Amino acid sequence: MANTAVLPNPLREGIRLGQTPDGCAMVIFGASGDLTARKLIPALYNLARHHMLPAGFNVIGCSKTPFTHEQFRDKMRKAVREDLNLPAGDDPVLNSFTSNLHYISDDFGDPAAYAQLTEFLNQLDRDKGTAGNRLFYLATPPSFFPVIVKHVGGAGLAKPKDPEKNWTRIVLEKPFGRDLKSAQDLNRVVTGVFGEQNVYRIDHYLGKETVQNLLVFRFANGIFEPIWNRRYIDHVQITVAEELGVENRASYFEEAGLFRDMIQSHVLQVLSLVTMEAPARFEARALRDEKAKVMRSFRPISLDEVDKFALRAQYSAGLVSGKKVPAYRAEPNVNPASSTETYAALKVFVDNWRWADVPFYIRSGKRLAKRVSEISIQFRRVPHLLFSGKVTESIQPNLLSVQIQPDEGISLKFSAKFPGTTMQIRPVKMQFQYGESFGGESPSAYETLLHDCMMGDNSLFTRNDAVEISWEFVDPILNRWKQDGSKGLAFYESGSWGPAEADAFIERDGRRWQRL
Amino acid sequence: MTDTFQTNIIGESRPANVSALAAELDSLWRSADKDAEGRHPVTRACALTLLVYTESDEAAREVSNLLGALTLQNPCRALIMVVRPAESPAGLSARISAVCQLPAPGEKQVCCEHVTIEACGDAVRDLDKVVVPLMVSGLPVYLWWRAGNTTEPEAFGKILRYIDRVYVDSEWFSNPEVELPALARKIQKYAGQVVVHDLNWARVTPWRELTAQCFDSPDTRSYLNQISGIQIEYSDRGTGGHSSLGQGLLFSAWLADRLGWKWVGRGTDKNASGTGKDANGNRSFLFRGQSGDIQVQLVPRPGGAECPSGFLSVQLKAAGKSRAAFSLTCGPGGKCVITHAEIPAHAPIDRTVNLEVFDEVGLLNEELKFSSHDQIYAEALAMVATMTA
């Protein structure tokens, strides 16, 4: 090497040339699984297509399933072609990308496997320009996390070769524990080996454009923040509804349930973005500090209060998208007497100056009427109605809706005079839709998050304190439901908007779920 | 208010009645809504006003055909101006249409307005009176300058003051060694008023990106200071039959500017005729860097259809204590680039990466993503002016 000093690359200056991460080796544990083929490799290929991966980027898939390097490459080539709908035929770019995919078939519990991995990583450093940087991705069932982390640490792979020049990071897929204690245990193991600053807990929900746009919407516009508080907002609803049932995840879902799967992870993160204060700067630490701070303000729900603040239900048979679907208990690999919830509703209060007494209603479920995720912010009614008689009945409160999926956008509902000689008032909607204002494709959540991780930006990843705070908040609810078994479990017809009990849950506060 | 302004006809010379044209647009949307009953609902979308400057009916027709693809990503009100100051009789006329994107079943069709305004003879002076009121209030106004020269008619200044950004394509320049410096002067003249973007810069961007990537690694970074020679092979009949010399100049000027090289002069092989080219048409430029002289050679290659992006290859050599070589070569079909890096004590690294070749609208869509002044472009352009003075 001609000169050991590492200077900034002056060719990267300017507004156009996005940063490319350093050369690195990404080790995927659980590489024979669905996540690798359906999400990770297509996302990496897309990054490569957009010149966002360095020349020295290589992937090593690790799993028990026996594959040769070439078999693994073939499988991944096929997966990329299917996922991205690429035309058949020779594709030199895809071939070049997959030539940097490698595979080691071994047992995660065997220390010898890690010695082999170490040797292979060193070889890639020499031959492929991976520069001593390592990214470990745990795409395995969570029960494997501690053993893999310990072995990676034991093999000396968790520490960078030269801390001045190299980095080592680890990405964990959710769930990060199944209760507070297991989350704490996992955090202890992982941070003990890697250090918290190198741990990236991935929640693909936070990589979605609309979720990221929440921050822009709140903090890059002058008109919303002044009214973003208890003085103007009556209540907020967050809905994450799916048409799908448990599909092929029944074994996992039976253990986890909807509350862990959706609310503890995704929805509470979204809630923190809606309710947090403005961070001092748009950078990871400030952002994550504010998120953790507001999560500490979520009013705890005691075991005795669970029925007042939370509700659970399970889908029965019904009709979704014109097709008959079975009840949850009739799904393959589901206990016929299962008390696992597939729907949950929750009322949260955020006890701070900004949000005191403003209820946040959350609902999420499977096999609901349609797939939609939306944040609905309902403003207070005007303090005095000028209009008399029946006209006032048609005046509805202003509603700001942030649609996360499928039609990403933001709309504002307000009242307008219906044209005519009499005073008639109708609600109308002002709408911004991503698809209409910005064409073109957005990067997938995994592309965004994987690139961030390689760049060392953990803004969109969940920090250990946020994970533990969220478990601390949800543990009493889960414990109470565990105690109760099937007692108190409501049922709803597949294809509906949830159980009648959920309507009663919000109606007793004089409010209604938004019709989405 | 008179009702004299007609759509779909080339009318006689008359004052342009702006409110009537606006009313025609309203009527267009009402009829589109009516036509769409029972089918895809019509959604009118607009994120900006796009003015397009052309100088012939043919060019305006081309633009009309291209705008469908543009509005898919950048819904806008497009005002296509056909400006012919030398033509008589003098007059203004207009045509309007809505361009809709065919949606997937059940989705809304997103439609945008296109207004073509033809100005001939003295009526060019009144063009602003038609165009300015049609700019959508509160949204940015961009001008796509789709002409081979950048000399605007005198009266055009009245429109220019309402414009936020101008998009030119220097590939249209027949003599980039003269016209790129002229563009640099124009950018200086309008500095602080409008931001100028060059579609040709967007063509160069993937090559700049891949070149920058060669030096992202700490192992290769230090060779930037030891570059001794660069050879750029460019197509002399690139996209649209134009020469890619302008891209070569911009690319080499960018490297020189970013790496802080001092301009020395034209290369030693400059011929006696003073054209700046040797017998093979090669241009050579000499710079001085930290580690000595750097020779940049621009080598034209006839044809170039197999590499529509404009470059066939870029080769960088580093001399000094340890030698290194980096190359980017246009790959099969022109849709990929083969990169090669060779540095001491490391195995050579080769890979094939995607090269997206954009058409004119694709380039415009790319440029529309960047809202701010591109200082790097401005500095590269200034360096071109130095190199070609």
Image (spheres, grey):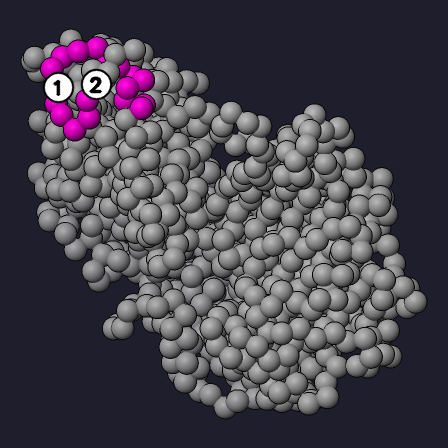
Left or right of residue B89, residue B139 in this image: right
- Kindly report the distance in space between the C-alpha atoms of the residues bearing marks 1 and 2: 8 Å
State the image quarter where residue B141 is shown: top left
The residue labelled by disc 1 is B11
Quarter of the image with the C terminus of chain A in it = bottom right
Q: Viewer-proximal residue, A222 or A460?
A: A222
Residue B177 in view: no
- Total marks placed: 2
Quick one: SS at disc 2? Answer: loop
Is B201 situated above or below B272?
Answer: below
Q: Report the magenta residues as a range.
A: B6-23
Seen at 55% across and 63% down, the residue is A371
Q: Viewer-proximal residue, A444 or B256?
A: A444
* x and y, in percent, of residue B236 in the image: 14, 42
Mark 1 and mark 2 lie on one chain; the one further toward the N terminus is 2
* x and y, in percent, of residue A285 in the image: 72, 48
Q: Which amino acid, mark 1?
A: Gly
Seen at 13% across and 19% down, the residue is B11
Residue B113 among magenta residues: no
The residue labelled by disc 2 is B5
Left or right of residue B259, residue A174 in this image: right
10 Å crowding of disc 1: few (<14), some (14-19), many (20+): some
Q: Which amino acid, mark 2?
A: Phe
Is A142 situated above or below A350?
Answer: below
